[in-house]
Image (cartoon, rainbow, N blue to C red):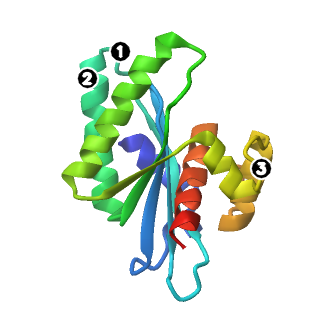
């Protein structure tokens, strides 16, 4: 979880937000890098703001059981820290590399477990749905989507790694589906 805190401190203005706003955590699941993006909005103006974003780095855990346990602990800490109304996850539906499919699905299961245990609503969106919601075109280029995310959330810095930008896109997609 130390990586989460280190990444968040890079943009201090993002971390200082009104805690009374509705919060959504977007998750981009991966086998060893899990992106997260937290957005908030007030029902009165419905303008989204980035509250925090970063990634969970599990590369130092070679054993599957240790990696999944650490992911579970980190997700519980994220949930406790941000107190989201819901968690939106990018749905894994097609994989080009069969070797990474199982670890990603395992990670996704742990994320869903942590959310369910905290009684948080869980929503899933395909990459096509996310791109369509953010850009109006389901096959939009990743760079276009990232630029639209930065503009929509008022983020001036480049968002990296891609897992983090993807997670913010999932959260913003979910917010737009709610409103």
Residue 81 visible in the current orientation: yes
Q: How many labels does the image show?
A: 3
Q: Can you say which quadrant of the picture contains the C terminus?
A: bottom right
x, y (%) of residue 12? Answer: 55, 64
In the displayed structure, 5 sits above or below 22; it is above
Q: How crowded is mark 3: few (under 14 residues within 10 Å), some or many (20 or more)?
A: some
The CA distance from mark 3 to mark 1 is 38 Å
Residue at x 36%, y 66% (from the top left corner): 85
Is 32 placed above or below 10 here?
above
Q: Residue at x 43, y 74 (%)?
A: 22
Q: Quadrant of residue 21?
A: bottom left
**Is the C-beta separation of discs 3 and 2 under 8 Å?**
no
Q: Which mark is residue 137?
A: 3
Mark 3 lies on a secondary structure that is loop
Q: Residue 62 carries which label?
A: 1
Mark pair 1, 2: CA separation: 8 Å
Percent x, y of residue 131: 69, 48
Q: x, y percentage for residue 169?
A: 61, 52
Ranked by sequence position, the earlier of labels 3 and 1 is 1
User: Does residue 4 sit above or below 150 in this rendering?
Assistant: above
Distance between the alpha carbons at the discs numbered 3 and 2: 39 Å
Q: Which residue lies furthest to the bottom in this view?
A: 44
- Closer-to-camera residue (7/150): 150
Residue positioned 68% across, 62% down in the render = 155
Residue pointed to by mark 2: 66
The reply, left or right, for residue 131 in relation to residue 174 is right
Q: What element carries label 1?
A: loop
- Report the side of 128 relative to 6 (left or right): right
* Residue appearing at x 27%, y 38% in the figure: 72
Neighbours of disc 2 within 10 Å: few (<14), some (14-19), many (20+): few
């Amino acid at each position: 979880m130390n990586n989460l805190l280190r990444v968040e401190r890079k943009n201090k203005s993002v971390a200082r937000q009104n805690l009374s706003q509705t919060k959504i955590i977007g998750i981009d699941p991966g086998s060893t890098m899990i992106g997260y993006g937290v957005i908030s909005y007030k029902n009165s103006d419905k303008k989204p703001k980035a509250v925090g974003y970063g990634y969970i780095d599990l590369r130092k855990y070679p054993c599957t059981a240790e990696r999944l346990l650490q992911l579970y602990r980190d997700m519980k800490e994220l949930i406790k820290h941000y107190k989201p109304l819901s968690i939106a996850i990018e749905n894994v539906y097609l994989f080009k590399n069969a070797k990474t499919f199982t670890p990603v699905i395992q990670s996704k299961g742990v994320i869903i477990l942590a959310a369910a245990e905290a009684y948080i609503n869980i929503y899933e969106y395909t990459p096509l749905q996310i791109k369509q919601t953010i850009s109006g075109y389901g096959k939009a280029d990743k760079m276009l989507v990232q630029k639209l995310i930065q503009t929509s959330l008022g983020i001036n810095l480049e968002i990296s790694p891609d897992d983090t930008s993807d997670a913010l896109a999932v959260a913003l997609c979910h917010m737009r589906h709610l409103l």
